[in-house]
Amino acid sequence: MEQFAIANTDGHPVPHRVVIVGGGFGGLYAAKALGRSKQIEITLIDKRNFHLFQPLLYQVATGKLSPGDISSPLRSILSHYRNVKVLMDEAIDVVPEQHQVILNTGVLPYDTLVVATGVSHDYFGQNQWAEIAPGLKTVEDAIRIRRRIFRAFEVAEKETDPEKRRAWLTFVVVGAGPTGVELAGALGELAHYALKHDFRNIDTRETQILLLEGLDRVLPPYPPELSTAAAKSLENLGVTVHTQSFVTGITEDTVTVRHEEQTETIQTKTVLWAAGVRASGMGKVLAERTDATLDRVGRVIVNPDLSVPGQPDIFVVGDLAHYKHQGDQPLPGVAPVAMQEGAYIAKLIRYRLQGRELPSFHYSDVGSLAVIGQNAAVVNLGWLKLSGFLAWLIWVFAHIYYLIEFDNKLVVMIQWAWNYFSRKGGSRLITQEENPLNHSELGGKLG
């Protein structure tokens, strides 16, 4: 295998080599915080050449934004940091004894390793459902979902059989966490506002949007009063919420749901999955190579300083980390947690090189937000709980603030302003599939 060398051509001692696997919030914030540290050389590895602002991915899936609006090239973001190198590659293994990361195309040595590869979908042992009910974690996922949503309306426009048309106009979202609630709310806005004048043979306001949740309320991590407000806002957008409902079967034409002792089969052509996560494969790799302990979804249980037990030079941050040293529950898999963990690791590495100690990581809870639709959101700041228009304004400005690059902030602000007054979506494109006749085919081409 090729040996990637972190070059040293000026005769000075070799800098401390930090390898970061994953260009999400945790990895990117660690790289930026370490930038311009002359004694440190950083290599960031990611399968993609861009950073994705995942909290707005559902807006790509429902046509409000384009993929480029919420994506930024990693090389562009980090171009001002001369000590940061970006490699588009995939880490497949780790050799802790030799301080090496094994990539698809070579071997990369490290002095400190930061793993931030996140999570993917979990279908609770029913992986065959992935072909029928796509989840929402990547740009490709969003484009597949967008294709399915808008194609459903197009097919319904041509369908003459009332039962078949009703199935095309029935959308089922599984899971009422933040992603499921935001996706269902965006579908409601799409059907009741953005598309209502666009078709001649169907009334999109007759669209059925069903949101299924296994627990007793939507947004289970939120305070009950905010869950109630969110459910009311969803109802106003035409979304029907079914709590304590469990999916037991999915086909291309139906969803089977169990509620208490009753079982119901729903005729639908579009099922969207937002009900569970599974840690990336790097969690299993670390467990095999370091004897790290994993939780039930495959996340690495880390030390108070985010290091892997027994491996002081390997750290796990972001959604892949199970951090149980603060409160009764592990820290949630949300962007602010990953950002703070990435910044903490950067500070810890600098302190170590200076011979100094840093206290354990402590997450400063900035609150949680979820949007249901225009002028409707819920915000939990701990000391303040809001719903409605003011919460929606806070949600808007918080997401604009955290977008990575200035041009993204400007484009999204303009697009949201236009959507606010026009109630029109911004990117309602149906991109071509490899087999356009097969609705379940997921391997489409972008563009």
Image: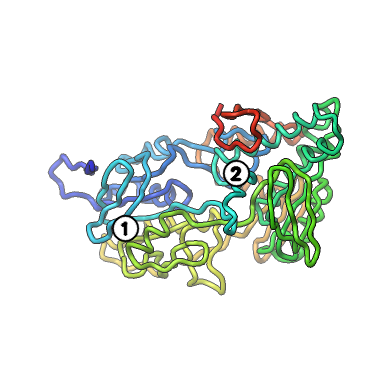
In the rendered image, residue 165, in percent from the top left (x then y), is placed at: 82, 35
Circle 2 SS class: helix
Q: In the picture shown, does residue 205 fall above or below 92? A: above
**Cα–Cα span, label 2 and label 1:** 45 Å
Residue in view at x 64 percent, y 55 percent: 275
Residue in view at x 67 percent, y 56 percent: 177
In the rendered image, which residue does mark 2 sit on?
A: 131
In the rendered image, residue 303, in percent from the top left (x then y), is placed at: 40, 69
- Within 10 Å of the Cα at label 1, are there few (<14), some (14-19), or many (20+) other Cα atoms? many
Q: In the picture shown, does residue 420 fall above or below 354? A: above
Give whichever of 217, 255 is nearer the camera: 255
Q: Is residue 173 left or right of residue 66?
A: right
Color style of the picture: rainbow
Give whichever of 90, 194 is nearer the camera: 90
Q: Is residue 123 left or right of residue 1?
A: right
Q: Is residue 227 visible?
A: no
Snapshot quadrant of residue 421 = top right
- Within 10 Å of the Cα at label 2, are there few (<14), some (14-19), or many (20+) other Cα atoms? some
